[in-house]
Amino acid sequence: MPPVFAHGALRLYLLALLEGGPKHGYELIKALEGRFEGAYSPSAGTIYPRLGKLEEEGLVSTEPSGRRTTYCITAAGVAELNRRRVDLAAVERGISASVQRLAVELMLQQFGDGIRADLQGQSPHGPLNAVALDQVRLVLEQARSAISSTLHS
């Protein structure tokens, strides 16, 4: 699987999430998971080192909050984000494209699983005869042709 974020894009996206208000690391992980509609959830080992680097660069500040740490964007972080709004828009487009690709993959997987289950469910009644197999092939080819036409219209 290719990386979800290009070099530096996660860093930028974390700043954008913090622009909406202070958050704990776990809240940032959940916000990313939600943005990817559950298809991607970064690990703590991905998020916390980047937050630490953002803090070292003065783009994020931290505040202890019980057993958790709250991360806040600094004025320098807002300035960085403002300088890179075009890059942020590209990151957002990339996320949208990834979510769409993942949705299509899931749809295809579910469709294939359903067809497989239907065909395997046929086995108690005996193997498919040649006529039924040809009919299934024809219907699948028609479905593929209809989808292709839809995509190219």
Image (cartoon, rainbow, N blue to C red):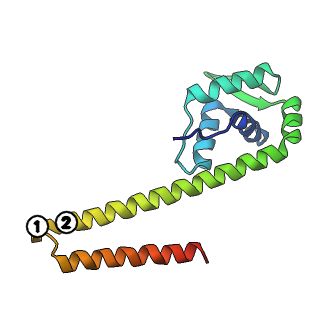
Q: Residue at x 77, y 31 (%)?
A: 72
Distance Cα–Cα, label 1 vs label 2? 7 Å
Which image quarter: residue 129?
bottom left
Q: Please indicate, yes or no, whether residue 69 appears anywhere in the rendered image.
A: no
Nearest the camera: 148 or 22?
Answer: 148
Q: Please indicate, yes or no, whether residue 59 appears anywhere in the rendered image.
A: yes
> Does residue 67 appear to the left or right of 142 in the view shown?
right
How many numbered discs?
Answer: 2
Residue at the disc numbered 1? 124
x then y, percent, for residue 58? 83, 23
x then y, percent, for residue 122? 17, 69
Three-letter amino acid code at disc 1? Pro
Q: Residue at x 60, y 33 (%)?
A: 26
Q: Quadrant of the C terminus?
A: bottom right
Q: What kind of element bears circle 2?
A: helix
- Crowd rating for badge 1 (residues with CA inside 10 Å; few <14, some 14–19, many 20+): few
Nearest the camera: 122 or 42?
Answer: 122
Which image quarter: residue 46?
top right
Three-letter amino acid code at disc 2? Gly
Residue 121: which disc? 2
x then y, percent, for residue 136? 29, 75
Q: Are marks 1 and 2 in contact (CB under 8 Å)?
A: yes
x then y, percent, for residue 50? 68, 26
For residue 23, above or below residue 69: below
> Does residue 75 appear to the left or right of 133 in the view shown?
right
